[in-house]
Amino acid sequence: MTGCATPVTTQTAAPPTNQSTNQPSGEPGDQTTAQLKARCQQLIAYFDRFGAGRSNNSDGRRNHTRLSAEVDCAKGLYAEGIAEMEALLRRKKFTPPPPGPDENEDYN
């Protein structure tokens, strides 16, 4: 039979996803709220340390995207804050650090 739709009984639904990370639930990419909060703080701290210049024209901590991400993280909107900070770091020609424990960058 040509042009027939697949019967409803054989169609499968997409697996449930974690709303904050958009990853399928139960997989290794599934992150807890504490991990997302830590990642958000990590990216903001990274920008504060390396993204702020010493010149008078540097926006540093006053960067509006950075401030917006900080507010999102404070409200519990971690995925949005993380996405904003990663995009900001890329625009500033930085590679976002990998998720993980805070390490002192000077001694690596």
Image (cartoon, rainbow, N blue to C red):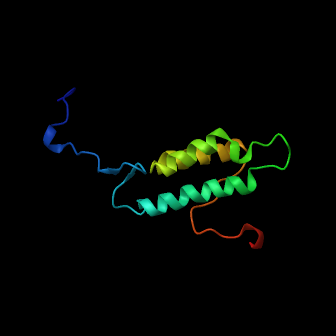
Q: Quadrant of residue 49?
A: bottom right
Q: Position of residue 6 (x, y in %)?
A: 19, 36
| Residue 31 seen in the figure | no
Is residue 52 found left or right of 15 in the rendered image?
Answer: right
Q: Residue at x 60, y 48 (%)?
A: 86
Q: Residue at x 34, y 56 (%)?
A: 25
Residue that protrudes farthest toward the bottom in the picture: 107
Q: From this view, report whether residue 30 is shown above or below residue 3.
A: below
Could you say which is closer to the camera, residue 10 or residue 69?
69
Q: Position of residue 65 (x, y in %)?
A: 62, 40
Q: From this view, report whether residue 95 is shown above or below residue 64.
A: below
Q: Quadrant of the N terminus?
A: top left
Is residue 61 found left or right of 78 in the rendered image?
Answer: right
Q: Residue at x 72, y 44 (%)?
A: 92
Number of numbered markers: 0
Could you say which is closer to the camera, residue 12 or residue 40?
40
Could you say which is closer to the camera, residue 54 or residue 4?
54
Q: From this view, report whether residue 37 is shown above or below residue 5.
A: below
Q: Position of residue 10 (x, y in %)?
A: 17, 44
Residue that protrudes farthest toward the top in the picture: 3
| Residue 15 seen in the figure | yes
Could you say which is closer to the camera, residue 42 or residue 59?
59
Q: Quadrant of residue 91?
A: top right
Q: Position of residue 23 (x, y in %)?
A: 40, 52
Q: Quadrant of the C terminus?
A: bottom right
Q: Residue at x 57, y 62 (%)?
A: 99
